[in-house]
Image (cartoon, grey):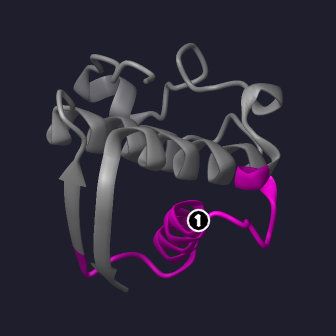
Amino acid sequence: MINVPELSNAQVAFGECLEWMPKYDDISEDYKSYHPKDEKIKKMKDLTSAWFFRGLKKLELTPNAGVDKDKALRAIKCIIGSFAPKHEHKEAAVAYLLCEWFKDVTWES
């Protein structure tokens, strides 16, 4: 499992994520696909898309064992708020990290 980074408020606010964010080439093709085969990946990609394009009214996260939910959420917000990576990279990385750090999610957009 990828470790959750320790981020400052400034890093989150300004989207400073390139140092620790998974490289695009290191992310499996299923996270880059518009039609992933794995149901968990599909769910995380649907959440990512809703978050980017509509925003979220409600988000409930069930973290994996040993994952600090608040730190992981800050890391996800850091990527979403970053202008540095291309959108495709951000979308794949967010879905990938959501799968790494959380068992399940529910949301309303």
Q: Residue at x 37, y 86 (%)?
A: 109
Front position in the image: 72 or 100: 100
Front position in the image: 43 or 37: 37
How packed mark 1 is, by other alpha carbons closer than 10 Å (few <14, some 14-19, many 20 or more), is many
Q: In the image, residue 7 lies at what x, y percent?
A: 30, 20
Q: Residue at x 46, y 48 (%)?
A: 99
Using the image, determine if residue 55 lies above or below residue 88. Answer: below
Q: Is residue 37 magenta?
A: yes
Q: In the image, residue 33 lies at what x, y percent?
A: 81, 61
Using the image, determine if residue 46 lies above or below residue 61. Answer: below
Q: Secondary structure at mark 1?
A: helix
Q: In the image, residue 78 lies at what x, y percent?
A: 42, 38
Task: Check the image and name the residue furthest to the front.
Answer: 38
Front position in the image: 21 or 98: 98
Residue 22 appears anywhere in the view: yes
Q: In the image, residue 36 lies at what x, y percent?
A: 73, 66
Task: Check the image and name the residue furthest to the bottom.
Answer: 109
Determine which residue is flagged by label 1. Answer: 45
Q: Residue at x 31, y 25 (%)?
A: 10
Which amino acid, by three-letter code, is at mark 1?
Answer: Lys
Q: Residue at x 60, y 69 (%)?
A: 42
Residue 81 appears anywhere in the view: no
Query: Most prominent secondary structure in the magenta stretch?
Result: helix
Front position in the image: 55 or 33: 33
Q: Which residues are magenta?
A: 30-58
Using the image, determine if residue 56 lies above or below residue 88. Answer: below
